């Protein structure tokens, strides 16, 4: 997640569907303490699809299947086995008899059907998942452990959808208000952890199950090694100082300034804290300012393009971002091979802005020096954001807009307030970020049928008949290369329509962590992170860390960069 980031995730790498790999000699160890900057408004990821909520939800409620992190083939989890009809429309799932809820009750086909019904109930705030699950007819219960899904149409995502939605306990949730009663508690989980302690606004704790049923699965042995995972809510700046004092074990909300300027302390120089860049194959999403095309001034393409020419990415990246990023020119940057061009950069060009705004009717100045049209309407808009770190580049943007006669207001909100405004599309522009997925489906973010859907993901209100046509052509195409070619064409069209002011990207992840962990040599998995699933606290490293800090002596250095391909297969 990035500048503010309402990363709204779905399945595979971002969602936690990827199979985890056991670490050699991994053992169940004590508490892992992590940082989060915002307390979730709900832990129920079906009604609050934020990054933090989804992470907790995935640890508490298991999915039917997982995906192997190396081969990307589906593997069993709640589902013991499955079969697909020749026409690709019927998926029959057999539930593993050892799969159980926290109270010992078996997971049954009734639970699968109940979960489908909860998501599809129009009274529930489950619109994002409803789009995906709604491609399937109500599942048919064959027997207690067998359920059959029938797709309404052939779609390359159907098996992924069946595999990846988190199954809920019917016997604990039926008859209760799904929107209200499961926000701060998640009963009866089937995942490796239970949500056991919640202090609203301050922290929440997940506790590892003993004798967890999925530990019997071969690919799950030796995973999820922390007895407790504690998430503490803290301002990122304050949290970084707390991390250096040992109050957090891992810190990943890393700005360019923190990375470049704030790691010269003894903690990093003596390797008590590790600083690493990780290069793997995780699909990268995009970040930017969503421009609300439902209302003026961004209902006019000329205005959107004019404002895009006032975002001085080159200057911001050089002076504020320390050269750590490159300008973003695609909504699916990971689909392009290294060296392959995506779309041309919309460069900083105030003269081009002036011409475009003149065409749009903003051809005169008011008494305060801002552009107005013939009706006296000033060219003015507000940018909604959360992160204090965003203010540095937004201030540059505001000043450049002012110099061009455009009035920009900066409105900083709490995360909870901003999410409400986003859900109601009550904004002019908003800084936002989206996670990438391995096999993208553009419908959720870009199809016009989702423009007015409450709580939907088409934030700009984007409509383009050609994009709709191309999106509608994708479902029956199982050939990844053919789908990618179509999505690149969609990318080109959307980029020209400027629904977002795209920001910047990096082809790596950054992480700080206390030098106490056992972990794979690759550090992260091939397509994701895997910290909670694959790392563990190494008692020998803990003792070395304590002795080093006490005596002010250095620990052995860790590699500054980890490239997945350099270490793959060595664990």
Image (spheres, rainbow, N blue to C red):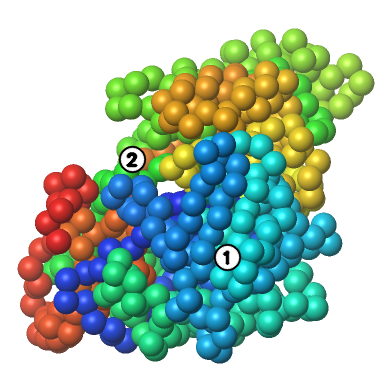
Q: CA distance from mark 2 to mark 1?
A: 43 Å
In this view, 128 is above or below 94: above
Residue 390 visible in image: no
Above or below, 182 relative to 416: below
State left or right for residue 547 relative to residue 233. Answer: left
Judging from the image, what secondary structure is the residue with disc 1 in?
Answer: strand
**Which tag is nearer the camera, tag 2 or tag 1?**
1
Of callouts 2 and 1, the N-terminal one = 1
Which residue corresponds to the image point at 38% horizontal and 20% vertical from the top-left?
A: 341
Residue, x 73% and y 27% (percent of image)?
463
Q: Please, what secondary structure does the residue beneath circle 2 have?
A: loop
- Location of mark 1 (residue): 146
| Residue 165 - label | none
Left or right of residue 185: residue 563: left
Q: Which mark is residue 507?
A: 2
Q: Between 20 and 195, which is closer to the camera in this rendering?
A: 20
Report x, y in % for residue 47.
69, 63
In the drawing, does residue 106 fall left or right of residue 137?
left
Residue 207 in sight here: yes
The x and y percentages for residue 53 are 57, 66
The quadrant holding residue 380 is top right
Q: Quadrant of the C terminus?
A: bottom left
Q: Is residue 372 left or right of residue 473?
A: right
Q: Quadrant of residue 124?
A: bottom right
Residue pictured at 55% horizontal, 81% vertical: 106
């Amino acid at each position: 997640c990035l500048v503010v980031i309402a990363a709204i995730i779905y399945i595979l790498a971002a969602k936690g569907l990827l199979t985890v790999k056991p670490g050699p000699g991994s053992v169940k160890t004590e508490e892992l303490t992590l940082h989060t900057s915002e307390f979730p408004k709900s832990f129920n990821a079906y009604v609050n699809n934020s990054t933090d909520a989804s992470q907790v939800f995935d640890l508490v409620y298991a999915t039917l299947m997982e995906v192997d992190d190396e081969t990307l083939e589906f593997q069993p989890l709640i589902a013991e086995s499955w079969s697909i009809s020749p026409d690709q429309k019927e998926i029959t799932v057999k539930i593993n008899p050892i799969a159980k809820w926290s109270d010992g009750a078996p997971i049954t086909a009734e639970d699968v059907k109940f979960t489908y019904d909860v998501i599809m109930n129009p009274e529930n705030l489950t619109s994002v998942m409803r789009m995906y699950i709604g491609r399937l007819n109500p599942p048919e219960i064959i027997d207690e452990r067998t359920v059959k899904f029938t797709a309404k149409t052939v779609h390359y995502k159907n098996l992924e959808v069946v595999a990846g939605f988190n199954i809920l306990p019917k016997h604990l949730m039926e008859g209760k208000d799904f929107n209200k009663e499961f926000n701060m508690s998640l009963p009866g989980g089937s995942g490796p952890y239970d949500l056991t302690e919640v202090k609203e606004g301050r922290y929440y704790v997940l506790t590892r199950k003993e004798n967890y049923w999925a530990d019997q699965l071969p690919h799950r042995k030796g995973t999820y090694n922390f007895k407790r995972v504690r998430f503490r809510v803290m301002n990122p700046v304050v949290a970084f100082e707390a991390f250096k004092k040992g109050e957090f074990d891992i810190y990943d909300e890393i700005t360019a300034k923190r990375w470049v300027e704030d790691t010269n302390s003894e903690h990093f120089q003596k390797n008590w804290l590790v600083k690493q860049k990780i290069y793997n194959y995780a699909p990268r999403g995009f970040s930017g300012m969503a421009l609300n095309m439902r209302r003026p001034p961004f209902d006019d393409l000329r205005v959107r393009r004019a404002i895009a020419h006032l975002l001085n990415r080159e200057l911001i990246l050089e002076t504020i971002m320390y050269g750590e990023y490159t300008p973003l020119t695609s909504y699916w940057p990971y689909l392009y091979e290294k060296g392959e061009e995506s779309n041309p950069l919309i460069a900083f060009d105030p003269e081009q802005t002036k011409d475009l705004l003149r065409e749009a009717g903003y051809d005169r100045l008011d008494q305060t020096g801002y552009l107005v049209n013939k009706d006296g309407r000033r060219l003015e808009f507000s940018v909604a954001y959360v992160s204090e770190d965003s203010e540095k580049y937004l201030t540059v943007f505001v000043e450049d807009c002012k110099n061009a006669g455009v009035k920009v207001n900066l409105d900083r909100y709490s995360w909870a307030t901003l999410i409400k405004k986003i859900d109601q599309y009550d904004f002019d522009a908003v800084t936002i970020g989206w996670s990438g997925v391995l096999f993208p489906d553009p419908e959720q973010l870009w199809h016009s049928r989702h423009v007015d859907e409450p709580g939907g993901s088409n934030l700009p209100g984007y409509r383009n008949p050609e994009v709709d046509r191309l999106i509608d052509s994708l479902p029956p195409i199982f050939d990844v290369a053919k789908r990618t070619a179509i999505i690149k064409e969609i990318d080109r069209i959307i980029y020209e329509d400027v629904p977002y002011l795209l920001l910047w990207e990096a082809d790596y992840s950054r992480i700080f962590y206390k030098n106490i962990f056992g972990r794979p040599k690759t550090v992260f998995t091939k397509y994701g992170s895997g910290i909670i699933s694959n790392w563990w606290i190494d008692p020998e490293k803990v003792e070395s860390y304590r002795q080093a800090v006490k005596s002010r002596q250095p620990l052995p250095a860790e590699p500054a960069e980890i490239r997945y391909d350099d270490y793959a297969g060595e664990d």
